[in-house]
Image (cartoon, rainbow, N blue to C red):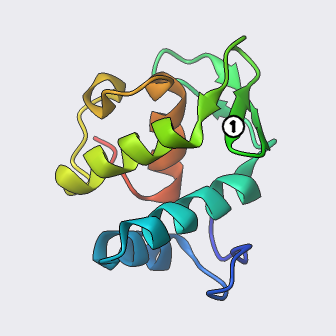
Amino acid sequence: MGNEPCADNYGPVNVMELRERIFQETEREKAQDYLWNELVLLQSQTFRTVKGLEYTYQIRGNEMLVSRKTKSITKASVDLALEKIIELSGEVAGPKKLKCFGASYLYPIFIEMGLIKSS
């Protein structure tokens, strides 16, 4: 990810700043907004699942449309995953630990963002 600007009202964000903002933010809604804005910036980038399957995604409103899925991942599911990441302090040992719909696609994105420490 690097130093791409964040599409929010809070200014440019790099990986470490994003992680710091999300983990230190006391208002959960703001943390969720930081994350969603970064997801918007990363759309169309190619990712790989833990099993090595390539995919991309597009954001449409409050939904994430993954190229390998017929159903979308809602913002609410992303928010649940974020709560789990914060609860586990970024120490998430695999997609299933996120305990939300679409975890196998969210997990690699969160690693790229620096929210999950890769093993």
Q: Quadrant of residue 38?
A: bottom right
Residue at the far top in the pictured view = 70
Residue ID at (71%, 14%):
68
Q: Secondary structure at mark 1?
A: strand
Asked if 58 appears above or below 85 in the picture, the reply is above
Q: Quarter of the image containing the C terminus?
A: top left
Residue 41 left/right relative to 33: right
Q: Residue at x 36, y 75 (%)?
A: 27
Q: Residue at horizontal 37%, vertical 77%? A: 20
Against 57, residue 16 (above or below) is below
Q: Quadrant of residue 22?
A: bottom left
Q: Given the image, on which type of amino acid does mark 1 rest?
A: Glu
Quadrant of the frame with the N terminus: bottom right
Q: Position of residue 77 (x, y in %)?
A: 47, 36
Instruction: Name the residue nearer the viewer: 115 or 28.
Output: 28
Which of these two is toward me, 104 or 62? 62
The residue at the point 69 percent across, 37 percent down is 63
Q: Which residue is mark 1?
A: 63
